[in-house]
Amino acid sequence: MSRVRTKTVKKASRVIIEKYYTKITHDFHTNKRICDEVAIIGSKQLRNKIAGYITHLMKRIEKGPVRGISIKLQEEERERRDNYMPEISVVSPSVIGQVKVDPVTKSMLEAMVSSLTTFI
């Protein structure tokens, strides 16, 4: 069984990951040395806990975005997905003429359009 990590360990780990994401790896011993270099941590035990949690979070980050950690790479990827524009639009005039709609759906759409125009 594992132990519950304290708020201090979690917060310190998140801050270190956000600032030094490019230096951190999936290796505990490397992360331990990086924690020594970039932060002033009071005890060896606390440093090891932070390095262990950093390693754990890095493995989770590899699988997908992690709540509470904003990394520029993830933000850029999210921005790219949000601003995605397809090369051929589904609603372009050249494609609309080619779309085939069954009679029932067409009558439903016409009824919707006529009901909307009565409110305007």
Image (cartoon, rainbow, N blue to C red):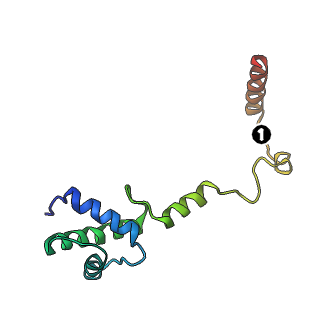
* Residue 55 image point, x, y percent: 29, 72
User: Along the horizontal axis of the image, is 59 left or right of 118?
Assistant: left
The residue lying at 77 percent from left, 26 percent from top is 113
Crowding at mark 1 (Cα within 10 Å: few <14, some 14-19, many 20+): few
Instruction: Farthest residue to the front: give it.
Output: 40
Name the image quarter holding residue 70.
Answer: bottom left
Task: Give the vertical position of 18 relative to 91 (above or below).
Answer: below
Name the image quarter holding residue 109.
Answer: top right
For the residue pair 119 and 94, the one nearer the viewer reads as: 119
* Residue 88 image point, x, y percent: 77, 57
Name the image quarter holding residue 57.
Answer: bottom left
User: Along the horizontal axis of the image, is 70 left or right of 119?
Assistant: left
The residue lying at 55 percent from left, 63 percent from top is 76
For the N terminus, the image quarter is bottom left
Instruction: Farthest residue to the top: give it.
Output: 118
* Residue 102 image point, x, y percent: 76, 37
User: Along the horizontal axis of the image, is 3 left or right of 24?
Assistant: left
Task: Give the vertical position of 2 relative to 90 (above or below).
Answer: below
For the residue pair 53 and 97, the one nearer the viewer reads as: 53
User: Which amino acid, by three-letter code, is at mark 1?
Assistant: Val
* Residue 22 image point, x, y percent: 43, 76
Tell how many labels.
1
User: Along the horizontal axis of the image, is 18 left or right of 110?
Assistant: left
The residue lying at 77 percent from left, 19 percent from top is 120
For label 1, the SS is: loop
Give the labeled residue for mark 1. Answer: 101
Task: Give the vertical position of 91 relative to 114 (above or below).
Answer: below
